[in-house]
Image (cartoon, helix red, strand yellow):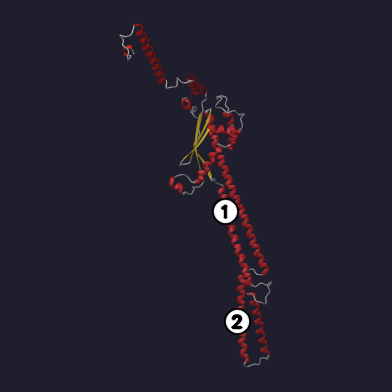
Amino acid sequence: MGMDNEPGIDRRQLSALDRARVLSQALADAARLARVSRRSRRALAGGGFQARRGANALRMAVFISFVLLVVIPSSWAAIYYGFVAADQFVSVADFTVSGGEAPAPDGLGALTGIPALAIIQDTQIVVNYIHSRAALEVLQKTADIRDVYANPKADWLARFDPKKPIEKFVKYWQGMSDVAIKMPAGIVELKIRAFAPEDARRLAQATIDVCEGLINDMNDRINRDAVANAEQELQRTATRLAAAQAALEKARNDSGLLDAAKSAEALDKLVTETKAGLLAMQQEYRTQLKYVSDSAPQMRELKSRIDVTQAQIADLESKLTSTQSRSAADPTIAGAMTTFGELDLERRIAERLYAGAAASLELARLNAERKMMYLKTFVSPVAAQEAQYPKRLLNPILLFVGCLALWGALCGLALTVRNYRA
């Protein structure tokens, strides 16, 4: 801007002093505009944060957090996995849990090929047992597992302190062992890690032996329970049969009859024959009565025989069926037949139950001689020739990526809060 551009000023009318003053004012205005323009450009180039209070402190905090969250952990991981971490060897074994008999296929297995529910349940029992405290205590007795993982040759971070309680050791064992079920075949894959190849193989074999011991214990318990239940059922049916036989014997002694049906048949036959004789005597009496007086001796004798025969028939019929003349203490053959029938029915039922219980006991004893479940190992554990753990390159990279992501998230959160409060 110059004085020639000033409106309303005639350069010819100004003196030299006035022209100098106008020129000085124009130069001052131009310098002020230039300073304002440079500050605006710097503010735009810096994203608007450099002009704020605390920008230097924020940059320092970002740098320090990067060192603490990314550089130091990543460097420590690279040093540990590269130079300090001990080699860990893996021994692998595969086995299945199956029953002694082919299980009946269910609907799900027929559609998907998945094993029956009983086999899946038995397999889950074995898998959960491997990571249990009970299995660890057995391994401690058979393989001295604490000394294996307290090996002084291993690094201080990976080995286990034997002074720690058993609960800590269970968690440590769960990290050093891996069990997976491969479906649909139900194959169990067991992986055991240790600091020496032979230790890993020995622990894997000991673990399989422990699982097989569990299967054998379950077989023994099932067989013992089956035999015990069968014996109890046989004893119960034997007691029932003995009671039925005793009741039938008492009824025979009380009635004086061995077989009520046969006695009734014989008595009925006797009554029939006696009635036939009575009818013949009555006919003879009527015939002779036409020619002989009823007071004749032979007629009185015949009449007496007829009366005696009728009394015998009445007595025999009263023994067969109940009559008003017989008391309740003198039972009839018909009542005895009813009582004998009930007691004989109870005896026959008790005999059949006893025979079934005896057969069940023999079957339970035969089944006890063979296993209900088997643990079949088709891939035996072997000593590894190369260490698979730790992942000396992958682990530091994963840690670096994770720390970098965490640092970036924290920085983004801090900047968001700062912009919100600005």
- Closer to us: mark 2 or mark 1? 1
Q: Residue 276 got which mark?
A: 2
For disc 1, the neighbor class at 10 Å (few under 14, some 14 to 19, many from 20) is: some
Q: Residue at x 60, y 60 (%)?
A: 351
Q: First in sequence: mark 2 or mark 1?
A: 2
Amino acid on which disc 2 is placed: Ala
* Residue 249 position within the rendered picture, expressed as x and y whole percent measured from the top left: 66, 65
Amino acid on which disc 1 is placed: Ser
Residue 403 shows up from this direction: no
Vertical placement of 366 versus 130: above or below?
below
Vertical placement of 85 versus 348: above or below?
above
Q: Residue 75 got which mark?
A: none
* Residue 283 position within the rendered picture, expressed as x and y whole percent measured from the top left: 60, 87
Q: Residue at x 38, y 16 (%)?
A: 33
Under circle 2, the secondary element is: helix
* Residue 202 position within the rendered picture, expressed as x and y whole percent measured from the top left: 54, 32
Quadrant housing residue 140: top right
Residue 220 shows up from this direction: yes
- In the foreground, 270 or 22: 22
For label 1, the residue is 360
Under circle 1, the secondary element is: helix
In the rendered image, the residue lying farthest to the top is 16
* Residue 380 position within the rendered picture, expressed as x and y whole percent measured from the top left: 50, 35
Q: Are marks 2 and 1 in contact (CB under 8 Å)?
A: no
For disc 2, the neighbor class at 10 Å (few under 14, some 14 to 19, many from 20) is: few
Vertical placement of 283 versus 249: above or below?
below
- In the foreground, 372 or 365: 372
Q: CA distance from mark 2 to mark 1?
A: 57 Å
Vertical placement of 401 versus 39: above or below?
below
